[in-house]
Amino acid sequence: MSATTSPAAAQTQRQRWLSILAKAPADRLEALWRGLGETPDYTLLRRPEIGLVMVQGRTSGSGAPFSAGEMTVTRAAVRLGGGQVGIGYVGGRRPRQAELVAVIDALSHLPNWRQPIEDRIVAPLVEEAEARRRQRLAKAAATKVDFFTVAREAGT
Amino acid sequence: MSDIAAGPLAEGLADPAHDSQRLFRAVLEAFSHPGRIVTLPDPPPAAAPLSPAATAFLLTLVDRDTPLWLAPALDTPAVCDFVRFHTGAAIARQPADALFAVLTPGQSGESGAPPLDSFLIGTDPYPDRSATLVIELPALTGGPERHWRGPGIQDRQAVGLTGLPDSFWTQWAANRALFPCGVDLVFAAGSDLLALPRSIAVET
């Protein structure tokens, strides 16, 4: 997360950020973005546009690829005053979120923005996503049926 | 992706669907009236060193199915990134691989530069499989006047393009002789376009 990261590390971090931002709830991301306060101006290189992408799957997870189906995707690209380009892709019809993701991606090229974004946008989103996951797991765990005794009876 | 982020990237059309239709109408106007100067209404910002007219032409007509060849003077990383990002077109390495090309006058007339017949001219059954070349000029008026004749022109049209060597017109006569095959040309200067389809004969 420091200002001097290797290209490979920077790419890994970018992938992590883009993944978290794309999966965040749109209104939550908007609120966190507002919370950042003053942000640099940007130009839309590609205004948010909605299209379809073919999702590929592999049989049994590792076999031959096949086309699983199409999903809606919104994409956008922006450029900051300094020429930094950011690209945002999110699932579904969410133009505003695609634009925000692109702006945040562009800001990630500026060393003095990395830490604030990590602390005030990415970290809270990770925490919330983790909380949602735990809640879902807990809900699922509550419905768990233990077949252990049945299996043992059947086995004897 | 990271190499896109390296240099400043010019923006494309503000409203891709409607702007490209509007610009296409202007290009169509130019091709229907060879020799007539058509000023593009509200062209997008130029991707230097391309002119606004050439930039608008590329954004309107080039896409991922049409490889583009750029003259060495225009083949800069900024232009290549611009074309790839906004149109998705591949940059052709050889003139003969391209369906569109952008040239500078030095490139299309003098020795060592690709002559017109190094581009695709189509075939007799499919004359449409030919290249369209955009030639960047300093101005579309003020040069030595020549008379153009052919479909879309009533009688004759006097056109005085600036910056074309005489050898260019010899090449054009050869291109005209290939009809129905041959390349089509568009001259660009500032935000003005002027078309020279293969059907036009040029006389001194």
Image (cartoon, coloured by chain):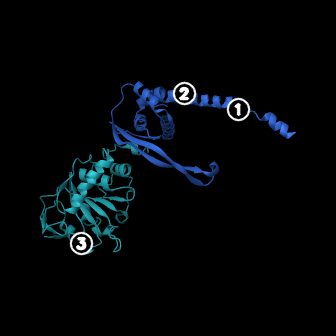
Q: CA distance from mark 1 to mark 2?
A: 25 Å
Screen quadrant of the C terminus of chain A: top right
Disc number for residue A127: 2
Do we see residue A141 in this rendering? Answer: yes
Q: Which residue is mark 1?
A: A144
Quick check: do tags 1 and 3 share a chain?
no
Between circles 1 and 3, the one closer to the viewer is 1
Do we see residue B55 in this rendering? Answer: no
| Residue in the foreground of this view, choosing between B36 and B93 | B36
Q: Quadrant of residue A81?
A: top left
Residue B20 in percent (x, y) is at 30, 51
User: What residue lies at 40% left-to-right and 26% top-to-bottom?
Assistant: A34
Residue placed furthest toward the right: A156
Q: CA distance from mark 1 to mark 3?
A: 80 Å
Crowding at label 2, few (<14), some or many (≥20) Cα neighbours within 10 Å?
few
Lateral position of residue A131 relative to residue B7, left or right: right
Q: Amino acid at mark 2?
A: Glu
Which colour is chain A painted?
Answer: blue
Residue B41 vertical placement versus A32 (above, below): below
Q: Amino acid at mark 1?
A: Lys
Q: Are marks 3 and 2 in contact (CB under 8 Å)?
A: no
SS at circle 1: loop
Q: Which residue is mark 3?
A: B176
Residue A86 vertical placement versus B191 (above, below): above
| Residue in the foreground of this view, choosing between A74 and B173 | A74
Residue A74 in percent (x, y) is at 43, 42
Residue B89 in percent (x, y) is at 38, 55
Q: Are marks 1 and 3 in contact (CB under 8 Å)?
A: no
Lateral position of residue A3 relative to residue B15, left or right: right
Q: CA distance from mark 3 to mark 2?
A: 69 Å
Which colour is chain B painted?
Answer: cyan
